[in-house]
Amino acid sequence: MTDLELIQTAIEARKRAYAPYSGFFVGAALLAADGRVFTGCNIENAAFTPTNCAERTAFFKAVSEGVRAFEAIAVVGGKGEEPSEFCAPCGVCRQVMAEFCSPDFRVILGNEKNQTVYTLSELLPASFSKSDL
Ligand code: THU
């Protein structure tokens, strides 16, 4: 699975986003070490706080299916039909990534035309994790 294929899968997942309050639609595609891909979208709520980001939806789907080893995630988000800006994961999602992923886990941001890649350690340096407990 190439980075572009993962982005394309995230674009498809974004079509299922439920974001009536922000109008900001996000899709994610999470590549597991076994080659399976778990998709996610953001799911908002009238009470706001229960809102779940696309990235965490993908992680929670995977972990709830017994999968805990991951290589990369693609994230596509924005307000328009085809977002041109990169959508960086929020701090809560970065912390969830840190629970299950190594520092070299790849976070691919972009759209069909442009992509940029960060490692998890670039996005969440000096993190608090299970090794601290
Ligand atoms: N959101 C995500 O799903 N992922 C991100 O990386 C950033 C933000 C969602 C949460 C909320 O539904 C909307 O985007 C606006 O914050």
Image (cartoon, rainbow, N blue to C red):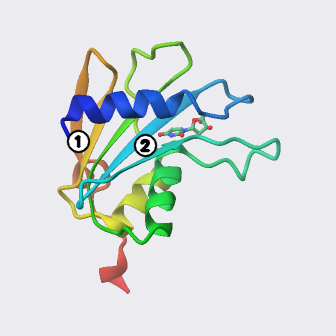
Q: Nearer the viewer, residue 52 or 103?
A: 52
Q: Earlier in the sequence, mark 2 or mark 1?
A: 2
Left or right, 6 with reference to 45: left
Residue at the spot 24% in from the left edge and 28% down from the top edge: 4
Residue 109, given in percent of the width and then of the height, sits at 32, 32
Q: Which mark is residue 24?
A: none
Query: Are the residues at dot 2 and dot 1 in contact (C-beta closer than 8 Å)?
Result: no
> For the residue marked with disc 1, what is the amino acid?
Tyr
Please say if 98 is above or below 4: below
Q: Assess disc 1: are there few (<14), some (14-19) or many (≥20) residues with their C-alpha within 10 Å of its C-alpha.
A: some
Residue at the spot 32% in from the left edge and 26% down from the top edge: 110
Quadrant of the frame with the N terminus: top left
Residue 8, given in percent of the width and then of the height, sits at 34, 27
Residue 48, given in percent of the width and then of the height, sits at 75, 44
Whole-angstrom CA distance, mark 2 to mark 1, is 11 Å
Which structural element holds mark 2?
Answer: loop
Left or right, 38 with reference to 19: left
Respond yes or no on whether mark 2 lies under 8 Å from ligand 1.
Answer: yes
Residue 107, given in percent of the width and then of the height, sits at 28, 43
Respond yes or no on whether mark 1 lies under 8 Å from ligand 1.
Answer: no
Left or right, 52 with reference to 58: right
Please say if 103 is above or below 29: below
Residue at the spot 36% in from the left edge and 79% down from the top edge: 130
Residue at the spot 60% in from the left edge and 33% down from the top edge: 17
Ligand 1 lies in quarter: top right
Q: Quadrant of residue 62?
A: bottom left
> For the residue marked with disc 2, what is the amino acid?
Pro
Q: Quadrant of residue 42?
A: top right
Q: Which mark is residue 118?
A: 1
Quadrant of the frame with the C terminus: bottom left
**Residue identified by numbered label 2:** 89
Q: Assess disc 2: are there few (<14), some (14-19) or many (≥20) residues with their C-alpha within 10 Å of its C-alpha.
A: many
